């Protein structure tokens, strides 16, 4: 058994890389699966509202200091 990464042989390094690759694929697969199933209650139900004529709003209350 190899107790150090420095003294490990080629097959041990290959096993480490393979396990990391499988774990990465598993995490990515779980993330994609969770993302695809998460849009059940997040659909937009509001209708499109068209814009009407533009209006100008002004306020003419200026303070007069005497």
Image (cartoon, grey):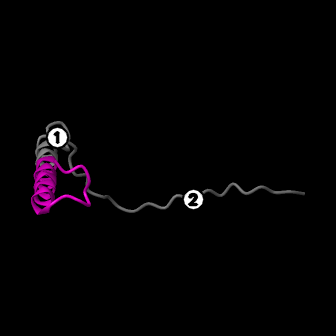
The percent position of residue 52, horizontal first and vertical second, equals 32, 58
Mark 1 neighbour density, 10 Å: few (under 14) some (14–19) many (20 or more): few
Indicate the quadrant containing the C terminus: top left, top right, bottom left or bottom right.
bottom right
Q: State yes or no: residue 11 in magenta.
A: yes
- Is 1 rendered above or below residue 57? above
User: How far apart in space, not on screen, are marks 2 and 1 (Cα)?
Assistant: 46 Å
The percent position of residue 31, horizontal first and vertical second, equals 16, 47
The percent position of residue 24, horizontal first and vertical second, equals 16, 53
The residue beneath circle 1 is 38
Relative depth, front residue between 12 and 65: 12
Report the residue at 11% width, 60% height from top.
Answer: 14
Residue at the right extreme of this rendering: 66
Q: State yes or no: residue 24 in magenta.
A: yes
* Segment tinted magenta in the rendering: 1-28
Report the residue at 9% width, 59% height from top.
Answer: 11
The residue beneath circle 2 is 58
Q: Is residue 59 left or right of residue 51?
A: right
């Amino acid at each position: 058994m190899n107790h150090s990464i420095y003294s490990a042989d080629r097959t041990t390094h290959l096993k480490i890389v393979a396990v990391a690759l499988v774990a990465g694929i598993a995490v990515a697969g779980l993330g994609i699966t969770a993302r695809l199933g998460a849009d059940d209650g997040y659909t937009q139900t509001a209708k499109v509202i068209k814009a009407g004529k533009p209006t100008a709003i002004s306020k003419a209350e200026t303070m007069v200091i005497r």
